Image: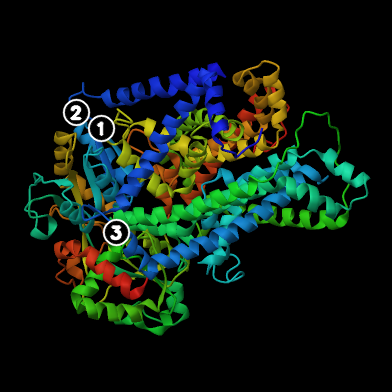
Amino acid sequence: MKKLFTVLAIVLVVVAPLVAQASGETAGKKSYETLQMYTALDTEEAQYYLDVFEKSTGIKVEYVRMSSGEVLARIEAEQSNPQASVWFGGSNTDHINAKSKDLLTPYKPNTDFELAPMLHADDYSWNGFYTGAIGFVSNTDFLKKNNLQPPTSWADLLNPVYKGQIEMAYPYTSGTAYTTLATIIQMKGLEGALDWWQLFDKNIHQYTKSGTACIARAGLGECAVGIAFSHDIMAKGIAMGYPLVISFPEEGTGYEVGAVSMVRGAKQIPEAKIFMDWCFTEEAQNLFIKYSRLPVNPKAIVAEGAIKLTDINLIDYDAVKMGLAKDEFVTAWRDRIGK
Amino acid sequence: MKKFKFSNTTRVNDLRKMIGEPFLLLAILVVLYLLIVFVIFPIFQVFKTSLSYEGALSLQNYFDVLSRSYYITPLINSMVLGVIVGTIGTIVGFMFAYAITRTPMKGKGVFRMIATFPMVSPPFVVALACILLFGRSGFFAGAIGNIYGLTGLVIVEVIAYSPTAFLALVGVLHAIDPALEEAAMDCGASRLKIFRTIIFPLATPGLVSAWLLVFIQSLADFGNPMILSGDFAVLSVQAYLQITGMFDLARGSTLAILLLIPTVVAFYLQKYLLSKKSYVTVTGKPTSATIKNLEWYIKAPVYAVCMFFAAVVLLFYGMVVWGSFQKLWGVDSTLTLRNYVQMWKMGKGYIVDSLVISVIVTPITGVLSMFIAYLTTRKQFPGRNFIEFSSMLTFAVPGTVVGIGYILAFNTPSILMPFTLTGTGFIIMILLVFRNLPVGIRNGVAAIQQIDPSIEEASIDLGADSSLTFRKITLPMITPAFFSGLANCFVRSMTAISAIIFVVSGKWNLITVAVLGFVDNSQYAQAAAMSLLLIAIVLIALGLIKLFTDRMGRGMNSSSILE
C-alpha cells in the first residue's frame, strides 16, 4: 500500500502542475499563435469556413463548438482569465448581452464596404457577418392531409387546426425563439404580445432547447409547423430532403444578425483581428452559399433559393433594445405563460 | 469493531492508531486535500454564486426561485421521476442480477451483455430511438400514448440506468454465500421464505445503494429530458437553461443547490438505514455450493422480466444501428455509408482525445475509489464522515453546475490550486476522476461491507499493519468490484457530456461533444453513427481489460460489464 500511496502522491502532486504548466507554455515560436475560438455554428459548418481561413492566412485555429448560451456562460465564468479570443457566430442578441456584461473588446474590422449601422455595435464590440429572417417551416404531408396552405401570418398560427402541432424553442434558451418573442413584442407591445401568446400557447406541442430542433422535427412529422430562421430552415430542413416548405408572415417579421466578436482579455489579439477582417471578405462571404446564410458583403454571391431580406416584409427590428431588455421580457413571458 | 460510535475515548484511540501508521495518515491527508480542492471548492463557488444578489450576500435568489411555480413544479417533477425510475430500475436490475447469479438461465453471457449495453452508449441515443419508435410518426406511433413527458422519460431512464443497479447488485448477490440458502432449504424453508429472510435482507445494502444510484442519476440526468421532457419540466434542465439561456449564473446555481438537497437527504437516509445491521457473509470459513434448479414460479417472472427488458434494449439499439445507415433518418431509408464517412471526417481528432483521456483517468479513479471505500468502511478517523459525504457530491450535482464550478474555481491560481487548469487537458481528467469516483466507491463499499472485519482484525492481530492487511486480505476480496469500477469508469469517461462541455478546449475535445453537436444540428443519422463507433471502441476496450485481468488469473466472474 505504501507504493500505492507514493504513486498516487507523485502523480497528483508533482506531475499535475508540470502538465498544467507545460501545456500553457506551448506555441509562441511561430510567427502566429494558434487562435483559440468558441463557435456557435455547427461543427461541420465551422470547419468548412475555418479550413479556408487557415489555408488563406496560415493561422491555425482551435475551437470548441457550443450553443450560443453556453458560449456566453463560459466566457462570463472565465472572464478573469479568458481561454478563447474569438466568439464566432450566434445571434447578435447574445453578443449584445455579452457587451452589456463588459465581456467583449471593440474592434472595427477592415472591410472594403460600409457596414450598415444595424450590422454592428456602436463601438464595434460585435460585428454582424450574416443575416437571416424569422420564418415558418411546415410539414407538407400535414398540410396536404388537412387541405391547408402554409401559414402566411402570425394570426394563421392561432388556427385551432394546429392545436398541439406547433413547436419552437423556449425564448430563454434560444436566440431564434427570443427573436420571435421580441418581434411579437415590437409589433404588439409587451401586454398585447403576452395576450396573443396565451392563445398561441394552446397550439404549442412543446418548447425545445435548441432553436433549430423544430425544423427536423417538423420534417419528421413530430410537429406540423416550426418557427426558425430562414437560413436554418433552408440548410437543415429543405436542403436535407425533408418534406418541408418555408413561408413568412405578411404583417412583418424579425430578423437576426449573426455576429463575431473579440473576447475581452483576448490572448491572440493580432490573430483575432485578422480573423474578424477575414469574415467580411468576399472569399469568406461567398462560402455562405453552402449554408444559405445571407452575406453582408455586397460583392458576395447570394445562394440560389436563399431568401433575401428584401423579398419579405421586415419590421424595423431593434436588436440592441431587445437584447438589453431580454431579462425583463423573458421574465414577463415566463410569469405569464408559466414555462 | 463497533461502527458509528463516537465516544471520546474511541476518538483518541483512533488518533493514536493513526499516528502509529504514518503512511495511512499521509494517505488520508492527501485524499482530504484532493476532495477539498476538486469537489468542495468548485461546489462552494457555485454555492457562493447562489448567495450573491446584486453584489451582496443574500438569500434573495432562493426567495425568488421558491416563489415561482415554474421553478417549484420542476423540483417536484424531478422527485417524482427519480422515485419512479429508481424503483423500477432497481427491480429490473435485481431481476437481472438474480437471474445471472442464482438461476440456471441459458445464455447468461448474452443477457449480461444486453443488460449493460445502455451503459456504453451516450444517454440521449436512447431518447432519440424512443422518438423514432414511439413518436407521432414513429414505427409504433401512439402505441404507448404521448412519449413527451413522464411516460417517455421513465421508459428511457429505466433503460439507461437499470444497468447501474444491475452491476451493483450482481456483485452483492454474488457475494452472498449460496450455502446459507442451502442450509435454509435443508431445514425445510420454502424458496419464497429463503428469498424473504435471507437473500433480500442480505442484499439490502446493495438494493438501497442501487436505488440511490439510480435515483440520483435520474435527478441529474439532462440529456434525456432535454429531448423528451415536453411539458414535464425537470430541475436539472431548468438549472442548465437558467445558466445557458438566461445567462443567470446566480439563479442557475440556486436551482442546482436545491437539487442537491434531496440527494443529500437520500444519502443520509441510506446511511442511517444501513448502520443498524450487519451484512457480513464472507467470513473466511470454507464454503461450497452449487446453483440448484428452481421452482417455476420463481423462474417464470424473473425470466419474463429479463426477456422483456432485453427485447426492449435490442429494439432500441437495433433502431440506432439501422438509423445510422439511413440516408435521412425517419424520411428516406435508402441505405448508405455516407454518415460513417462524414462522421470519420469530422471526428478523428475527437476520438483520439477521448481515448487518451479515458485511458489516463480510468486507473486513477479505480485505485482512488477503492481506497476511499476502504477508508470509509473500515477505518475510524476524524474526517471520515466528511470524506464519505464529499466523495459522493460530484455525482449528485448536475454536470452543468460542476462544469461551471470548475471554471470558477480553476480559471485563476489560488491558494488551494496554485496553477491555472482551464484550457488544459488536465482539468478534463480531474473532472472525470471526481465525477466517476462515487460509482466506484459505492461498488467498493457494498463489496467491503460484506467482508467480516474479523478477517482483517485477525491479520492485524497477527502483526500485519493496515497496509499489508489491505493488500493481502481486503484487496483480493474486492478485486471484482475494483475491475467492475475500472470498466464503469472507462465507460463513463467516454460517454460523459454535460459537465465536459464547459471544460473542453480547442486542444482537448471529446467525442461526445461531437455527438451532441450532431444532435443539436438534427443530424440524427450521423449522431447514431458516431455513437455506434463510440460503443464499438468501449466494447473493444472492455474486451482488452478482461483479457488483461484473465491473464492475471484472478478468475473473475463478478459484478462487471466485462463478461
> Which mark is first along the chain, 2 or 1?
2
Q: Nearer the viewer, residue B476 or A135?
A: B476
SS class, disc 2: loop
Q: Please state which of the two labelled residues, at mark 1 or mark 3, is closer to the viewer.
A: 3
Can residue B314 be seen here? The reply is: yes
Residue A20 at x, y percent in the picture? 33, 26
Residue with the mark numbered 1: A60
User: Residue at position x 22%, y 76% from top?
Assistant: A190
Alpha carbon separation for disc pair 1 and 2: 8 Å
Mark on residue A32?
Answer: 2
Marks 1 and 2 close (CB-CB < 8 Å) = yes
Residue with the mark numbered 3: B246
Q: Nearer the viewer, residue B452 or B109?
A: B452
- View extreme (front): residue: B9
Q: How many marks?
A: 3
Residue B219 at x, y percent in the picture? 50, 55
User: Residue at position x 10%, y 50% from top?
Assistant: A124
Q: Are marks 2 and 3 on the same chain?
A: no
Instruction: Specify few, some or many for label 2: CA neighbours under 10 Å numbering under 14, 14-19, or 20 or more.
Output: some
Amino acid marked by disc 2: Tyr
SS class, disc 1: loop
